[in-house]
Every structure is written in structure tokens, then in C-alpha cells.
Image (spheres, helix red, strand yellow):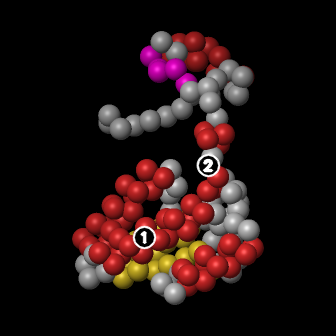
Amino acid sequence: MSGLMFSLRTSSSWPHCSRLSRLLSPLLPPLSTHNSSSKMSSDAHWLSPADREQLVMELRATGWMEVDDRNAIFKELHFKTFNQAFGFMSRVALQAEKMNHHPEWFNVYNKVQITLTTHDCGGLSKRDIKMAKFIDKIALSM
């Protein structure tokens, strides 16, 4: 299980683990001291109403729709086979890692349902628009 990762709560975040922390600290790499949310880029902020209307309108033309009860967009894609759907998801996953922006998705056989929203800002952001355009580009190439 070389890919297994876990985090250890420090004694300040969990008072009862100070002894465990002292025992495991020589075995674990040092924990990062920077806050990952502080690296949130400008494209992770809410879209202005004018930008949102324009950008979402462009995406509607390619099959994206707004989710009624959430500040998110949704698209369902159908492929010829499971392998094609899974290949598509793999390509999107690689881009998601590069962007540090991961879709919510569901797959059954040749169907992939994708919801995009930016949890950091609690709604739709430029990151979602960029990811949606990337998804459309990859889907067309499959």
C-alpha cells in the first residue's frame, strides 16, 4: 500500500494525541505549515453576475446546465463504451490534478455525469469555466 496517505492531528488540534504525536513524529515527514487555501488563485473567486451570465450562456450551447438548488453547472456525457468513458475520465482527472480543481462526478458504464462548483468560494468560479471548456474539448476528441 505505497499510495496510502493519512494526516496526523497535532496536539494543538486534538489534545489527547500528544503522546501519539511524539511517538510517530520520527516516522512521519514534517507537516506543511502553509495553508493551502492561502494559495487560492484569483480564478477561484465567485464570478460577477455579468461574467457568470456571459460564460454560462456560452457553456449552455455545449450542453451544460445550471443546477437549480446549487451554485453549480452540470453535464451528462454518453460514450460508445465503458472504456471510452473511463479513458475520458482519466484525461479529465489528470487535468483536475494540474488545476487542483476536482469535479464531482458519477459513472455508470458509458455515461458520465459531471457537476462543477468551487467549494473554496461556495459557488461558480473561473476554475469551473476553465474545467468545463477542457471537458468539452476532451469529449470532442473521443
Position of 8 relative to 136 (above/below): above
Asked whether 49 falls inside the magenta stretch, the response is no
Residue depth check, mark 1 versus mark 2: number of the one nearer the observer: 2
**Horizontal arrangement in the rendering, residue 17 relative to residue 93 (left or right):** right
Residue 117 placed where, x, y %? 61, 65
Most common secondary structure along the magenta stretch: loop
Which region is colored magenta?
27-31
Mark with earlier residue (1, 2): 2
Asked which secondary structure carries label 2, the reply is loop
The residue at the far right in this view is: 49
Q: Which mark is residue 41?
A: 2
Asked whether 29 falls inside the magenta stretch, the response is yes
Which residue is depicted at the point 65% across and 66% down?
124
Which residue is depicted at the point 26% across and 82% down?
80
Please state which of residues 39 and 88 is positioned toward the viewer in this rendering: 39
Q: Which mark is residue 135?
A: 1
Which residue is depicted at the point 56% across and 65% down?
128
Q: What amino acid type is highlighted by mark number 2?
A: Ser
Q: Is residue 78 visible?
A: yes
